[in-house]
Amino acid sequence: MRKPLSLIAGAAVLGLALAGCSTGGGESDPGNADQVEVFTWWASGSEKVGLDALVKVFNEQYPDIEFINASVAGGAGSNAKAALASRLEANDPPDTFQAHAGAELTDYINAGQLQDLSSFYEEQGLTDVFPASLIEQLTVDGAIYSVPSNIHRANVTWVNTAVLEGAGIDPTKAPADIDAWIDDLQKLKDSGVESPLALGTEWTQMQLLENVLIADLGAEGYSGLWTGDTAWDSDGVKTAVDHYGELMKFVNSDFAGLEWDAATQILLDGNAGYNVMGDWAEAAFVQAGQTYGDEYTTWPTPGTDGVFDFLADSFTLPVGAPHEQAAKDWLTTISSAEGQKAFNIAKGSIPARTDATASDYPAYQQTAITSFADDTVVSSLAHGAAASISWSGDISSAVGKFGTDKDAASLVSALVAAADKALG
């Protein structure tokens, strides 16, 4: 999440200051802070490992507050978002809920369902320890509505080194662009690898498409898609759609029914050479006992070197939170140096704080910390930073349809229609 290009569609709009923010000492009204219900989609696998690490720090910092795990599994958060929408509509909010920082928050803000956390940032000193570019990306009309627990990178290609070496491909060198990558995919196919590129369900397809859009349009052109500066029927988008269609010829036939971890497992098992996935996949490789630079490695997706495709898992303070002070205490933990270190080492992401020590992190995360500091940052489509929930949903439906009919012209038309609807 972050650099010269400011991320499109920030996450905030109101200017009301919150009073009485926690100072991190756990001092709160016992009647309003004896428990905190935290709503996430981190229900299993490496994501649950990361949540558990974060909860451990929270329990140490606030031993008198009971943590209530309200996680909802499945769909990369889509199931959780549907359940959350029902609760918010019924005026039954959790104390805090997970959301991707960026445009995904727009619908909640417009509905008046989130409190402004600007004064919380000031009281906790977060404007001093979060990068200025991140603060800018989180702010709209002077207000901030969420606290990031991490930063993830979405333009990462995970590489099984043995599979590539078996086809005579150097796994340490990324192809220069999408065309060169397609050539290597064909080499893998010719060597006997049935499905060179592991892929999963609809949102993973959308993430692959956004990677291709970045590669073919460049950072500025890709970011212009979300402001109307880049036309969705431009030659660059059409080239990207054609490239995306070519890549789909190399994926596993059961992609539509696989969650991200199952798609990543294809790579882990040596039945694919590549998988484009966010860096939450790092935890899966670690848990499998693999070593970065040995059994697996990573590159920025071909054609996207020098760009950091950003998303951030963040937490909010809903209007009407039953245990508001405890929710602020949770936000204090997730933004603390201790909380971010424990969480990100476990989850494969990197801290939002600039005072983190890179050498404390494993090899992959060190590369991401460097890239986040040096590269041009753009917003992830598939993970809520670039487009509103409704716009992203329309794109997801179009991408899912393309997975069945492979009709490039129809996909471009659907993308144009989605943008016209979203941008007016």
Image (cartoon, helix red, strand yellow):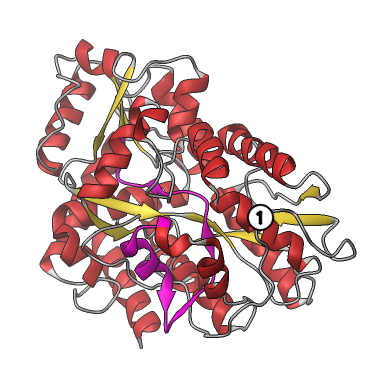
Give the residue displayed 62% in from the left and 56% down from the top. 332
Residue 50 occupies quadrant: top right
Is residue 6 depicted above or below 241 in this figure?
below
Q: Is residue 45 visible?
A: yes
Disc 1 is placed on an element classified as: loop
Q: Nearer the viewer, residue 408 or 350?
A: 350
130 magenta-colored: yes
Residue 266 in magenta stretch: no
Q: Name the residue under label 1.
A: 24
**Quadrant position of the N terminus in the picture:** bottom left
Q: What residue type is labelled 1?
A: Gly
Q: Is residue 19 left or right of residue 127?
A: right
The part of the image, by quadrant, that contains residue 32 is bottom right
Vertical placement of residue 228 versus 342, above or below = below
Q: Magenta segment range?
A: 129-157
Could you tell me residue 95's position as x and y percent? Answer: 74, 63
Q: Measuring 14% from the left and 14% from the top, which residue is drawn there?
A: 168
- Give the residue furthest to the right: 31
Give x and y (percent) for residue 57: 66, 39
Image quadrant for the C terminus?
A: bottom left
Residue appearing at x 15%, y 55% in the figure: 216
Q: How crowded is mark 1: few (under 14 residues within 10 Å), some or many (20 or more)?
A: some
Report if residue 101 is visible in the image: no
Q: Note whether 215 is above or below 315 in the view shown.
A: above
Query: Picture coordinates of residue 137 (x, y %)?
Result: 37, 68
